[in-house]
Image: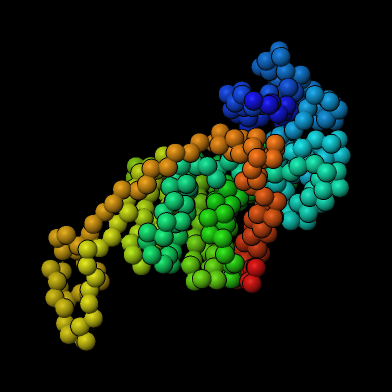
Amino acid sequence: MEKIRIGIIGFGFMGHEHLNLLSQHEGYEVVAVCDIDEVQLKDVPSSIAVYDHASKLLADENVQVVIVVVNNNQHRDIVCMAAEAGKDIICEKPAAMSVAEFDEMVRVTEQNGVKLTVHHQRRYDPDFRTTKEVFDSKTLGNLYSIKSSLYGFNGNMHDWHVYLSEGGGMLYDWGVHLLDQLMWMINEPIVSIFADIRNVINQEVDDYFKILIRFRSGLVAEVELGTYYLEDKDKWFERHWVLAGDNGTMYLDGFDPEGKIVRTSRMLKNVGGKRTMTSAGPTRSFGPPGEGVIVTEPIPEVATVHMDYFNNYHDAYFGRAEFVVKVPEVRRVLALMEAARKSSVNSQSVQFDIGR
């Protein structure tokens, strides 16, 4: 298999993760890494070139593709430097601090004829792919509500993520993933966005948000994240999904998802104003269901791993496929996050890409 020679700019936690993952793929060879902190470079294998500045790695002719893993506020400058050095680029998310920054990055990469994509590897999360399988199959009928949530117990964040100037905060850190998943799954125009973004525990950066997205079909998606949003339920501090349609509901919990598809064996018929008695009294929609009314089905089994992102990149790099993460998709998510921030500041819904 033909190899892609990789240079990693930024060798902190995620830089190490990239090296560990790519070392397991026969189609990649990490040939160089770079970090301004020499402590991060102490465990680099001897076969890999080590640099203390991005410009030195970019001058290495052995590097074909760079993975940009620096702080969020440095993405634009490093990506533009890499493009001008003739390197193809995989940028960590969020690709930029704003749509304007991203537009500049795209312009420079296009001028220099290099490939640009973004590391949205969570398109291959098992919980998301299971949800997408149910969504795509239309087994729940006409969907009216989707909920995507992630909760934590620690409250605080780490390292540079606590600084606004560095591009910290949970909307940039996890929100970009949650929104990217939804936008990739629900491929239709948005009508409006309403968002509540807060600093609950952290002083500078957001650590809670709830975003409501109304699509042209009438479907409403809700995204909620809190770093200090507590329950004592199993798998609470992981991922949660709910899809609700007129032919049933799907729920699942956990990154390695557990859940069910839930339906009813019969529906209450209209009775023209006549009182309907149940075991709970004269109620029609609420109270304990009768025996056999609630029926369940297993959620589908979906085999997916983060390595699939790099499998796709390898195929696309050599022209055998399209890049799974496309530039217009990245831009739309960045624009969505900007609209969410505007909505939260003004406490008003914001119209988005109507007629897209």
Check the image and name the residue furthest to the bottom: 272
**Is residue 312 positioned above or below 149 on the image?**
above
**Is residue 73 positioned above or below 270 on the image?**
above
Q: Nearer the viewer, residue 194 or 256?
A: 256
On the rendered image, what quadrant is the N terminus found in?
A: top right
Please report the residue visible at 14 percent of the width from the left and 60 percent of the height from the top.
291
Q: Where does the image place residue 174, in percent across and percent down from the top left?
A: 57, 46
Q: Quadrant of residue 5?
A: top right
Q: Nearer the viewer, residue 253 or 243?
A: 243
Locate residue 21 relative to residue 164 in the image: left or right: left
Q: Where does the image place residue 144, in percent across and percent down from the top left?
A: 43, 67
Q: Where does the image place residue 46, in percent across and percent down from the top left?
A: 71, 12
Please report the residue visible at 44 percent of the width from the left and 51 percent of the height from the top.
133
Q: Nearer the viewer, residue 140 or 282?
A: 140
Check the image and name the residue furthest to the top: 46
Please report the residue visible at 21 percent of the width from the left and 86 percent of the height from the top.
273
Q: Quadrant of residue 135?
A: bottom left
Locate residue 189 relative to residue 237 in the image: left or right: right
Q: Is residue 276 visible?
A: yes
Q: Quadrant of residue 134?
A: bottom left
Q: How many marks?
A: 0
Please report the residue visible at 83 percent of the width from the left and 44 percent of the height from the top.
113
Q: Nearer the viewer, residue 164 or 279?
A: 279
Q: Where does the image place residue 14, in percent across and percent down from the top left?
A: 63, 32
Locate residue 54 relative to residue 240 in the image: left or right: right
Check the image and name the residue furthest to the front: 320
Color encoding of the figure: rainbow
Locate residue 208 relative to residue 276 in the image: left or right: right
Q: Is residue 239 visible?
A: no
On the rendered image, what quadrant is the C terminus found in?
A: bottom right
